[in-house]
Image (spheres, rainbow, N blue to C red):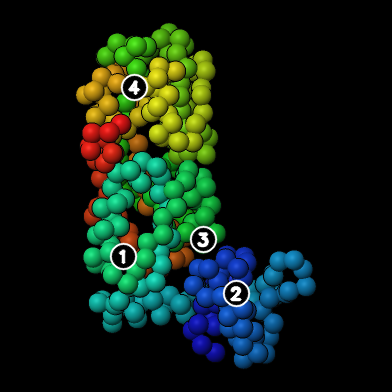
Amino acid sequence: MTLKQLEAFYWAATLGTFAIAAERLHVTQSTLSKRIAELEDSLGNALFDRSGQRAQLTPAGTALLPRVRAMLDLENDIRETLARGEVIEGRCHVGISELSATTWFPAFVAAVGQQYPLLQIHPQVGLTKELERLVERGKLDCAVVTGSSVSADLHCETIAEVDFSWMASPARLKRGTVLDAARMALHPVIASSVDSGLAEPLQAWATHAGVQLREVLPCNSLTTILAMTVAGMGISFLPRHYVQPLVRRKMLVELRSDPPLPTIAYRFIRRRDDTRQLVARMRAAVVQEIDFDMPNPLWSAGSV
């Protein structure tokens, strides 16, 4: 019995498939299957029922799982205690939003590259619900998302807050216009789609304000929302500091609302049972580099 065999069994059992577990451990599926078979031979018990399309735990496998988790936790504690200077290498799959990708994430990648030159960062840009599912399934090591999660398998920690403001084209509304219920009823709202973590705070704000949104134009791209707003197709709520270059160029005007929009939290998420040093180091690096006040670098270069 080896730790690699126990690790293969644990992640296959926890993630539900040999294929995803193999990706998580950066081995081939045949290598993972071999390690599990060797563990079963060593214990003299089948740990998975492979008769169906999906491998299911046998009673022996179910009984073994919490004990294996305890052994892997102990291994991690030993490594943390004795190897503070441990080399971090391999690949780390990180989920981010479009806002992260065009603000702090390039600086994060550069900082990680300097500190951990043997580590490769593999980003995946997506919406909150999709990224949560990928972290939950083990296809992503961690992610930075907004919105609330209902998954008991995920550990969520707020690491940043972002101010949002209502924005419009100056051709549609004057700067400083107060958006009360009556005015809101006159303008389409260009907003992130339901899989985005921003859909929830928008609906909560509308309910609290007693506002009936006349028309919502859903979109899954921040860049497209910006373009449609600049074109005067509707109003939108956008990261306040992020769009200031467009405000200064009079392509957008900032509006006010009664009540004002809430500050929106961004969270670092990982699987609750993932105690690897890799994820802990990535969380520390994200906290160090995260800065949503940075403008899009293309705008800073004078191109919009």
Q: CB atoms at circles 2 and 1 under 8 Å apart? A: no
Q: CA distance from mark 2 to mark 1?
A: 27 Å
Name the residue type under label 3.
Lys
Name the residue type under label 2.
Gln
Give the mark nearer the N terminus: 3 vs 4.
Answer: 3
Residue matched to label 4: 167
Residue matched to label 3: 139
Q: CA distance from mark 3 to mark 1?
A: 18 Å
Nearest to the eye among marks 2 and 1: give it.
Answer: 2
Q: Quadrant of the N terminus?
A: bottom right
Disc 1 packing (10 Å; few <14; some 14–19; many ≥20): some
Name the residue type under label 1.
Arg
Residue matched to label 2: 29
Name the residue type under label 4.
Met
Q: CA distance from mark 2 to mark 4?
A: 50 Å
Give the mark nearer the N terminus: 2 vs 3.
Answer: 2
Residue shown at 24% from the left, 67% from the top:
115
Can see residue 283? yes
Q: Which mark is residue 172?
A: none
Q: CB atoms at circles 2 and 3 under 8 Å apart? A: no
Residue matched to label 1: 281
Nearest to the eye among marks 3 and 1: give it.
Answer: 3
Give the mark nearer the N terminus: 2 vs 1.
Answer: 2
